Amino acid sequence: MRLTVVGSSGSVPGPDSACSCYLVEQDGFRLLLDLGTGAVGPLQRYVAPADVGAVVVTHAHGDHWADLVELGYLRTLPDVGPLPPLPVHGPANLRTVVRENPTVYAPTDLAPGERRVGPFDLRFAATEHIEHSHAVRVDDALCYTGDTAPCAALDELAAGCEVLLAEASGVLGPLRGGHLTAADAGRLAARSGARLLVLTHLRPWQDHAELLAEAAHHAGCPRRARSPWINPGDRPSPAIGSPRDG
């Protein structure tokens, strides 16, 4: 399995990163976890639009799905298609632009439970963000939190994963807004026993080095610039190893 961080910015694209998009590849199959604002541009460095096998959208905020529109357009160009509709596993409240274009998209509603997508066994858990938000587990290797406040369902889903792809943009207090803080991400990594924590959904105005230090402190593990688990592209997301790495 290969993970590429295509974009990891939260809320809006930043000067160095598009919004959330994570490419997972195995046995020639390409799965996207989210496809947020601005992500379809850098995505083309790693995969042709025609070769995307499926997309998982964790919730209906635009910074997690908006570039489905651009990907759909690229897949309908005369020199690319015709292609079968793109499988999109997403929230029940995903916009009609996806749901009302059956020649471009084949949407399936997310729900807690398991499903097979390409070579992957996916498991979903409902999380605490907006209505119809989900986190996703990919085989035993990877757990992606999406956007969520800490919750028991996320703890259960993440337990025993190898790589934890966790948002870290939340702030304490009444403005928390259903998000994990960097400290929450670090504590979740420690509880789950993950070998690698990759921080995501980092807003452009936040101090990313400070968030990484906070997560590392609460996870009890060293910071690392790069990891063999991920293809970081031009600008890697902050990542830290866990105590299981020594």
Image (cartoon, helix red, strand yellow):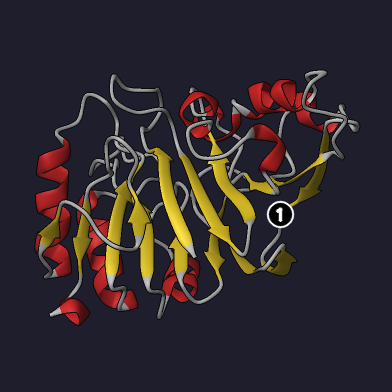
Tag 1, which secondary structure?
loop
On screen, residue 125 versus residue 129, left or right, reads right
Q: Position of residue 3 (x, y in %)?
A: 44, 55
Q: Is residue 126 visible?
A: no
Q: Position of residue 54 (x, y in %)?
A: 70, 48
**Quarter of image, res 50:** top right
In this rendered view, identify the residue nearer to me: 109 or 72: 72
Q: Residues within 10 Å of mark 1 (few under 14, many from 20)?
A: many
In this rendered view, identify the residue nearer to me: 17 or 200: 17
Q: Residue at x 66, y 33 (%)?
A: 49
Q: Residue at x 73, y 28 (%)?
A: 95
On screen, residue 184 versus residue 12, left or right, reads left
Q: Residue at x 74, y 43 (%)?
A: 92
On screen, residue 60 versus residue 226, left or right, reads right
Q: Position of residue 207 (x, y in %)?
A: 14, 33
Is the residue 164 above or below the residue 11 in the image?
below
Q: Position of residue 74 (x, y in %)?
A: 70, 23
Is the residue 100 above or below the residue 8 in the image?
above
The residue pinned by badge 1 equals 110
Q: Is residue 130 visible?
A: yes
Is the residue 123 above or below the residue 75 in the image?
below
Is the residue 70 above or below the residue 209 in the image?
above
Name which residue type carries label 1.
Leu
